[in-house]
Image: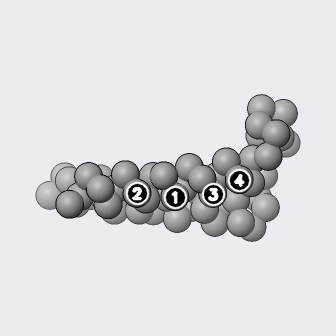
Amino acid sequence: MLDIIIFLMQIVLGITMIYRGVTNRIEPMDVKIFKNPKHMYVAVGIFVLVLAFWGFI
């Protein structure tokens, strides 16, 4: 049961990160840390989704 909940949380986290990068919801602090935070958010979101599905199989 716990693995299903963690899997769903990872899916939500991945989709949220991709949405945040695509819709340009970038904080000013993110720009200070990363050169292009939009690409970082999308890449990390895809990475989290891949890891979620890889771990679930």
Counting from the top left corner in percent of width and height, residue 33 is at 77, 32
CB-based contact (under 8 Å), mark 1 and mark 4: no
In the image, residue 32 sits, relative to residue 36, either above or below, namely above
Left or right of 48 in this view: 52: left
Report the residue marked by disc 2.
50
Counting from the top left corner in percent of width and height, residue 55 is at 26, 52
Report the residue marked by disc 4.
39
- Quadrant of the rendering where the N terminus is positioned: bottom left
Counting from the top left corner in percent of width and height, residue 42 is at 63, 57
From this viewpoint, is residue 29 visible? no
From this viewpoint, is residue 50 visible? yes
- Amino acid type of disc 2? Val
Residue 8 has which mark? Answer: none
Judging from the image, what secondary structure is the residue with disc 4 in? helix
Labels 2 and 4: the sequence-earlier one? 4
CA gap between label 1 and label 4 equals: 11 Å
Judging from the image, what secondary structure is the residue with disc 1 in? helix
Question: How many marks overall?
Answer: 4
Examine the image and state in which quarter residue 50 appears.
bottom left
- Amino acid type of disc 1? Ile
Report the residue marked by disc 3.
42
Left or right of 32 in this view: 47: left
CA gap between label 1 and label 2 equals: 6 Å
- Residue at 43 percent across and 59 percent down: it is 49
CB-based contact (under 8 Å), mark 1 and mark 3: yes
Judging from the image, what secondary structure is the residue with disc 3 in? helix
Examine the image and state in which quarter residue 7 appears.
bottom left
CB-based contact (under 8 Å), mark 3 and mark 4: yes
- Residue at 67 percent across and 48 percent down: it is 40
Comparing 12 with 43, the one in front is 43
CB-based contact (under 8 Å), mark 1 and mark 2: yes
Residue most extreme to the left? 1
